[in-house]
Amino acid sequence: MTGHPAAAARFLDDAARAAWHDQSLWFMRQKRDRGSALPEWESLRFAGSALKAHAMSRLADLLEEFERRATANGVVVHWARDAREHNAIVLGILRTAHVTRVSKSKSMLTEECGLNPFLEAQGIEVVDTDLGERIVQLAGEAPSHIVIPAIHWKREEIGALFHRTMGTPAGETSPDALAAAARVHLRDALLHAGAGITGANALVAETGGVVVCTNEGNADLGMHSAPIHIACVGIEKIIATRDDLGVLLRLLARSGTGQPVTAYTTHVTAPRPGAAMHVVLVDNGRTARLADAAMRTALHCIRCGACLNTCPVYRRSGGYSYGTVIQGPIGAILAPAIDLDAHQALPYASTLCGSCVDVCPVRIDIPAQLLAWRARGAAAGRLPRGYGIVFEVLRRVLGTPATFARATRWARRVQRLVPAAWLSGRWNPWTRPGRALPVLADESFREWARRERNQP
Amino acid sequence: MIRVALAVPCYVDQFRPQAARATLALLERLGCDVSLGFDAPCCGQPMFNAGVVEAARDVAAGWLAASGAFDAIVMPSGSCTHHLRHHVPALLAGAASAHAARVTYELCEFIAGPLGRPTLAGHFPHRVAMHLGCHARRGLRLGGATELHQPESGPMHAMLGALDGLTLVPLDRADECCGFGGTFAVGEPDVSVSMGRDKLGDVTGHGAEVLVSSDPSCLLHLDGIARHGRSALRVMHIAELLEEATR
Amino acid sequence: MTARDDVLAAIRAADVPAAPAASVPTAIVDRTDLHAAFLRVLTVVGGVGAVLSPGQSVPQLVSELLGAIGAQAVIVPGRFAVAENGAVYVDSDDVTARIAIVLAEHLVVVVPHAAIVPTMHEAVRLMPAESRCGWFLSGPSKTADIEQSLVFGAQGSRTHCVVFDIATGVG
């Protein structure tokens, strides 16, 4: 096995840890269920879906409207076709201002663009300021969950990491004490940065506002203390009106963590006196996705993380098993658009159970797109190994009642003659993890019906 | 007398014919005139879910040809019914697929709906855990979804709840997927079995003696894990349970 | 072609079919005592709050609610409160420096008693049109990034207090 199935198998090797991971995320799912139990929740989800579809249908107009207002307010708006242009724009801003140290609050877009390694290679230090992101950054890892980046870390491990990197007492494992140490560490980094980079949860065309949601307050500490604020934003984050923002904010935190709203929801339209504010609008494959009618709604994603939390596969395979910046069900439909060869296994990393659609605050039909990606991969000759032969055989066997009857009679003969142990070898993925082979009945239903009911 | 055709999916025919026989017996007991003349092996769901669309279309075409002669078709499988209703009409657009989508029912859905028997009188003195397959639950909406803040409900739940002596055991994660997922079961075998073990742990942890499902494909997988672990759990298809309870 | 032109051209070439603007759903909420509802949620999100009694001063109430740390609290005016999520809206025009909102260890927001709305649907319409920066603040800074244990005072305020002022609304 390679790709996701192999990585998932490795994750499951530590059964106790996998069970802990599963339960941690199930706990999030339950918090989401409680937090989203509003009488109008379903109509809110429909509104969330509608406001995103509307924004996508007027994307160019809304971006221009946003740009017009933001520019009038003294914000510098940049456009980037791809990750390389995005990184170059950010570097240019930092170089011009002689910045050597930046703070960065959570931004999946900058992860997607590889901004951190790029800036570090240019001699600019980047401190990720979300606590979870800082944990994985100090460990030299990437986030394993878009909302809870260090969900796979245990407190003892965080204690050891902080002991090594921040000098906390050896053996300290109390979340309060560790978070307190991180507060000092991160505030220092935040207040001494030459620029504060943030992502954005939304851009509002009607107000020209950049909306940033955090619980820790780290985005605000970064953007309001440094002389430069740079917001790096994918173009699909735009929404039309403040009414849309109201709907979005009611959905976002409830879906992600079960909170009624994040502790800090910042709506910023202009730099503070004496400071500079930049917004970098990034395409990086989004317009291609927009042109792809079958997959377009994946752009509606508001990155709440609910589909990760509910996904029984994500919970039992961990974020790294996906090998992508965005993990879980949404990641499995986003990644193939970027590189179908590299991510052909991801659309298969799902049972199509449909839980992700039902928790999605903007009702993205993820299973439909998983199926569509499977079909595209198959059409492009990228079926998982062995599937081609298996399904060609099945197509013939299941083609007519006669072929089916012949093939199954033959299979039963094999079952009688070949010892079960041979059929349940290590090579057989059905039995290998601990699952007995299904047994072909001595008499099929059709045979029984022919005998008992005189069917032809 | 209601005329209905019994459509037996490929794997039920071969691996669980007793579920098909129980479906037949139950429908006849409920006064249906059941035709066994539906002869197509498979609806094409396995190929479709794997992305092998051409093969899925070929196989589904045979199924649709068999469907044309009937005004009501019952299948003892939620996921096959879901495939016919929600995928085949797009795969093979036309009158034949629209007809099949309209007349094909999952067993409990048919008994509670067209037959007008939301509950059956019967006796089944056991502790039973119910597993509704995801395509029946979230695809056909034959059960509540906790994601949508719905209580457990639906025709199978109501029928089980009405049987004398039956104790329906509550599960911690009643609507969590069992991990079968078609090709997923062999493409992602480790996650698949891990999910199945968790499902069985939930079921036996609540003291259930019987696990019942309207989806024989989920049962194929769960039964395999239960047999591997030499579990005493009795794994049944809903048709088998209802047939036994109403004897 | 600039990147801007290219991106906008690619969007227009994608030819997305028109989709109507979303309509705001009707929130089904109990509007009888919004202050009580607000204070209930505020407690859940880790804040404290109360309605000022006649004759009572803001510092008096703050010291009642926060004890000794009340004296160190940074007091800012809030424009309005949102009952459904315990949030108060603070605008940067009303504070000396934006950073104060997150730098303050203990933050007190004084909101006019009458300025409360049931949900975010009403709240977003009250955001001042000319605002340069504004916040919805719901409880103190928090994190659950360490094994999902909730810790207050992650990086911003440790204490978050909301006072409803019947008389003037501004402390």
Image (cartoon, rainbow, N blue to C red):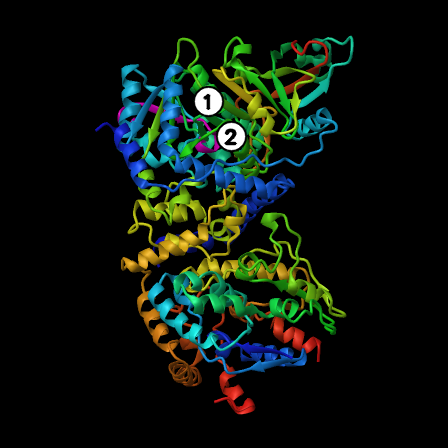
Q: Residue at x 67, y 80 (%)?
A: B29
| SS at circle 1 | loop
| Residue situated in front as seen by the camera: C49 or B89 | B89
User: According to the image, label 2 marks what residue?
Assistant: A245
Q: Where is residue B124 in the image (x, y as percent from the top left)?
A: 72, 73
Residue A393 x/y as whole percent: 34, 74
Q: How crowded is mark 1: few (under 14 residues within 10 Å), some or many (20 or more)?
A: many
Please tell me whether residue B144 is drawn above or below residue A276 in the rendered image.
below
Where is residue C78, by image quadrant? top right
x, y (%) of residue A172? 54, 32
The answer to whether C9 appears left or right of A399 in the picture is left
Which range is magenta? A119-134
Residue B6 makes an appearance in the image: yes
Residue sitting at x 46%, y 80%: B39
Name of the residue lying farthest toward the left? C1
Is C117 part of what is drawn in magenta? no
Name the side, left or right, on which B140 lies relative to A140.
right
Q: In this view, does B49 lie above or below C39?
A: below
Residue tagged 1: A207
- Report the label total: 2
> How packed is label 2: few (under 14 Cα within 10 Å), some, or many (20 or more)?
many
In magenta stretch: residue A125: yes
Tell me which amino acid carries mark 1: Thr
Quadrant of residue B243 within the rendered picture: bottom right
In primary-sequence order, the first of circles 2 and 1 is 1
Q: The residue under label 2 is which amino acid type?
A: Leu
